[in-house]
């Protein structure tokens, strides 16, 4: 069986996990925002292209 680790070591381990999770969530959020922004730009581009292709009667 494993011996218990000292409290400061356990705290450092949990802080490390917290930092890694925070970085992961931050990267996920930034990628999600970039994806949403590019989807919006693509939709705007398609709409402007469709508007320019319409004939005026």
Image (cartoon, helix red, strand yellow):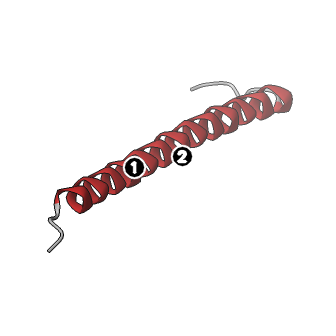
Q: Of 2 and 32, which appears nearest the observer?
A: 32
52 left or right, relative to 55: right
The answer to which image quadrant residue 11 occupies is top right
Image point 14% across, 65% down: which residue?
Answer: 55
44 left or right, relative to 55: right
Image point 50% across, 41% down: which residue?
Answer: 28
Q: Residue 29, percent across and down?
A: 54, 46
Q: Residues within 10 Å of mark 1 (few under 14, many from 20)?
A: few
Residue placed farthest to the right in the image?
Answer: 8
State the residue position of label 1. 41
Which of disc 2 and disc 1 is earlier in sequence?
A: 2
The answer to which image quadrant residue 17 occupies is top right
Q: Can you say whether 2 is above or below 46 in the image? A: above
Q: Can you say whether 52 is above or below 5 in the image? A: below
Image point 24% across, 56% down: which residue?
Answer: 52
State the residue position of label 2. 29
């Amino acid at each position: 069986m494993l011996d218990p680790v000292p409290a400061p070591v356990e705290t450092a381990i949990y802080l490390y996990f917290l930092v890694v999770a925070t970085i992961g969530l931050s990267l996920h959020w930034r990628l999600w925002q970039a994806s949403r922004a590019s989807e919006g730009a693509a939709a705007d581009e398609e709409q402007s292209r469709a508007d320019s292709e319409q004939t005026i009667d």
